[in-house]
Image: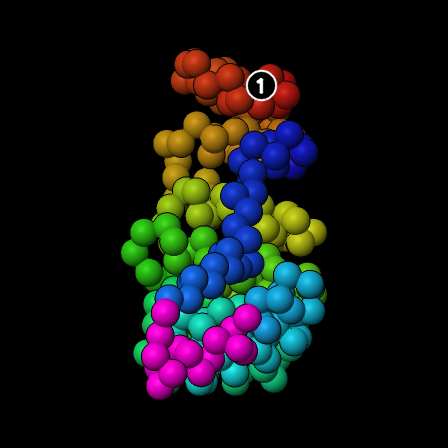
């Protein structure tokens, strides 16, 4: 398939593997008996270590602070930093604390998926990725995309996980989601997986102009140039003021 079509139809709506780290809350005056007061030293040490790029030290300090303050936000922050540092041992400890302190939702599921992937437990990872993908709205599948984009140990592992998710029908029935995961497959240099996703997109969203562009590319690759040209002509009539789509159609001629 031509590179121009890939660029348009599989434009990576690249989600970061992790959402931005939570900023530490400014300490307010507390009594000596307040748990937050006991954790302040560890919290400051963690922040200084983080600013200095010493992620291992930062993860440990935030984990200590989270334990002392019994604070779910600090446990989440410790988990994120440990994952960024690729410190699986501390990440597991922080994640366990985060869960015990009442952590829940998409961020927790994403962190659990990343840790499972790092440990090579792909079955467990798929469970958490499925949880993300089945969440209503767009936030869940974007988190899953981010996990696969940045959480895998290597491209082959990411491709293997994505392949299983496509096989099991876990990708949401949304054009943007399919294009995003198709873009990921392209970035992972998995042409067979890309073609499978293209076929799914064409079947699921036949009325979409950009899907028609994918179909035209397939027709041309299969030697059906006349059919491809006719389809492109009909797409040009639908393009209206969409300059990006018009350029992509022109590139296909």
185 with respect to 94 (left or right): right
Q: Position of residue 80 (x, y in %)?
A: 53, 68
| Protein image colouring | rainbow
SS category of the residue bearing label 1:
helix
141 with respect to 186 (left or right): left
Q: Position of residue 120 (x, y in %)?
A: 62, 79
Residue 46 magenta = no
**Residue at figure coordinates x 59%, y 73% from the top left:** 45
Q: Position of residue 172 (x, y in %)?
A: 38, 54
Which residues lie in the magenta part?
Answer: 29-44
Determine which quarter of the picture holds residue 159: bottom right
Q: Quadrant of the N terminus?
A: top right
**Residue at figure coordinates x 41%, y 42% from the top left:** 175
Q: Is residue 89 above or below residue 237?
A: below
Residue indicated by mark 1: 247
Q: Residue 186 versus residue 154: which sits nearer the camera? A: 154
Q: Residue 118 versus residue 203: which sits nearer the camera? A: 118
**Residue at figure coordinates x 55%, y 71% from the top left:** 44
Most frequent secondary structure within the magenta stretch: helix
Q: Position of residue 149 (x, y in %)?
A: 59, 57
Q: Residue 84 versus residue 60: which sits nearer the camera? A: 60
Q: Residue 100 versus residue 114: which sits nearer the camera? A: 100
Q: Quadrant of the C terminus?
A: top right
Residue 37 magenta = yes
Residue 33 visible to the viewer:
yes
Q: Residue furthest left?
A: 136
Q: Is residue 113 above or below residue 229?
A: below
């Amino acid at each position: 398939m031509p590179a121009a079509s890939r660029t348009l139809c599989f434009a990576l709506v690249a989600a970061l593997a992790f959402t931005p780290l939570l900023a530490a809350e400014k300490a307010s005056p507390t009594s000596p008996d307040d748990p937050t007061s006991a954790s302040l030293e560890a919290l400051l040490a963690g922040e200084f270590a983080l600013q200095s790029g010493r992620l291992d030290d930062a993860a440990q300090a935030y984990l200590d602070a989270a334990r002392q303050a019994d604070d779910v936000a600090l446990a989440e922050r410790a988990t994120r930093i440990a994952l960024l540092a690729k410190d699986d041992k501390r990440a597991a400890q922080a994640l366990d604390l985060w869960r015990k302190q009442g952590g829940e939702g998409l961020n927790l599921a994403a962190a659990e998926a990343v840790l499972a992937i790092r440990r090579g437990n792909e079955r467990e990872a798929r469970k958490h990725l499925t949880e993300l993908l089945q969440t209503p709205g767009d936030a869940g599948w974007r988190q899953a995309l981010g996990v696969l984009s940045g959480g895998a140990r290597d491209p082959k592992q990411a491709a293997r996980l994505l392949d299983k998710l496509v096989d099991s029908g876990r990708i949401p029935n949304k054009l943007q989601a399919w294009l995003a995961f198709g873009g990921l497959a392209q970035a992972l240099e998995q042409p067979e997986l890309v073609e499978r996703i293209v076929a799914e997109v064409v079947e699921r969203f036949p009325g979409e102009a950009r899907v028609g562009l994918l179909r035209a590319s397939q027709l041309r690759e299969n030697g059906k140039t006349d059919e491809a040209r006719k389809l492109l002509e009909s797409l040009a009539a639908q393009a209206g003021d969409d300059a990006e789509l018009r350029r992509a159609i022109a590139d296909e001629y």
